[in-house]
Image (cartoon, grey):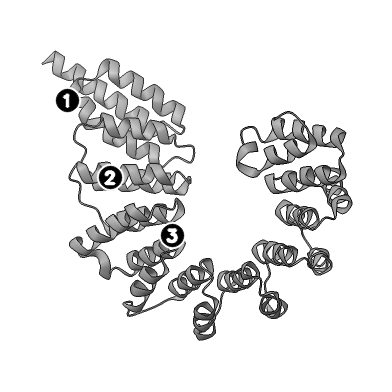
Amino acid sequence: MQFLNKKGQALARITQYLKVSKTTDQLKQTHNLLLKILTRTQQRYILPFLLAHLLQLSDDDLLYARHLLDKIPNCRTQFLWNCTIRNHVNRAQFSQSIVLYAKMHRRGVLPSGFTFSSVLNACARVPAVVEGKQTHTRLLQSGFLDNKIVKTALLDMYAKCGFVLDACRVFETMDERDAVAWTAMICGYTKVGMMDEARRLFDGMEEQNVVSWSAMVAGYANCGDMRAARELYDVMVERNSVTWIAMIAGYGKCGDVREARRVFDGIAERDESCWAAMVACYAQNGYAKEAIEMYEAMREGNVGLTEVAMVGAISACAQLGDVDLGNKLANIVEEMFCGIKSSTGLDNCSSMLGMPQ
């Protein structure tokens, strides 16, 4: 009897610690303690509560969350799986979200509409169309395809993965199409350069939003149709970084550096991406001196440097044959962007300057 009382007291003690734990570190301390003072049966009982508490914290440790999920014997609590997957999606760990969903499926835990919308979102962001199609198949089997949120997530997944015909089929089966669905379909068309279809949908929207406007402007700019891009850009009520960068880059591809600079000068609040786009525009059109001046202005104004800006600046150094500045930029790359050189073309620029790679 006394032994049972001690076990009950230990469980009550851990439960109280869980209630007052406010950080991941405190929860880990509680976890270490329960492993010492609770029986295995009590541990199996309390671990799900520990994980649920962890997933509610703003500083939740996702690696630790997965560790806890694995430690819960045969965990079939849908809520815990859903929250773990959702937290990974919210923290941009999309591939891991898909892995968790697959593990959930193997464990025989039934998914909900919330599960499907989360994993489809992850598939869209990777992009992972094979896993997305597998999820679509399971949707058909489970009956959740009538869920409006899930169907919109499915449409968005196909659109972001560039499978625009599949996205269109989903779009056409929707009884009610909200602005999110219309915008996702428009973005899908613009992604693959189907601007006539995108424009037809855009003109058919009851209320165009900033995302659909931005997608259209960027789509036209990416296709090199700067006249159409400019027509929409000039009548936009709310411009943003996406449209500014698209216009600068579009004019840069067409060789119209003067118009690109006009767009840049018209931006009231320029972020680092806008500056970088202008550096790249100058560099790719042979305005090496102006590219370096723009880069120097970024440095003097404490504007954050980006990979695009560094590629443009080093390319300008190559054009000018300025090995000294090129070496300085290469050192900055090593310090600030460790590991990106081969993926951004910085190695090629360094080679042009005769600098070591």
Circle 2: is it few (<14), some (14-19), or many (20+) Cα within 10 Å? some
Q: CA distance from mark 2 to mark 1?
A: 28 Å
Q: Nearer the viewer, residue 300 or 345?
A: 345
Give the residue drawn at x 45%, y 37%. 60
Q: Nearer the viewer, residue 269 or 193?
A: 193
**Figure quadrant of residue 231:** bottom right
**Circle 1: element type:** helix
Residue 268 drawn at (x, y percent): 79, 64
Which amino acid, mark 3? Cys
Give the residue drawn at x 20%, y 42%. 106
Mark 2 touches mark 1? (CB < 8 Å): no
Asked if residue 189 lies left or right of residue 245, the reply is left
Mark 3 touches mark 2? (CB < 8 Å): no
Give the residue drawn at x 38%, y 49%. 86
Mark 3 touches mark 1? (CB < 8 Å): no
Whether residue 305 appears in this view of the structure is no
Q: Which mark is residue 41?
A: 1
Circle 1: is it few (<14), some (14-19), or many (20+) Cα within 10 Å? few
Identify the image quadrant of the N terminus. top left
Identify the image quadrant of the C terminus. top right
Q: Which mark is residue 184?
A: none
Q: Earlier in the sequence, mark 3 or mark 1?
A: 1
> Which residue position holds label 2?
102
**Circle 2: element type:** helix
> Which residue position holds label 3?
161
Look at discs 3 and 2 and give the one toward the viewer: 3
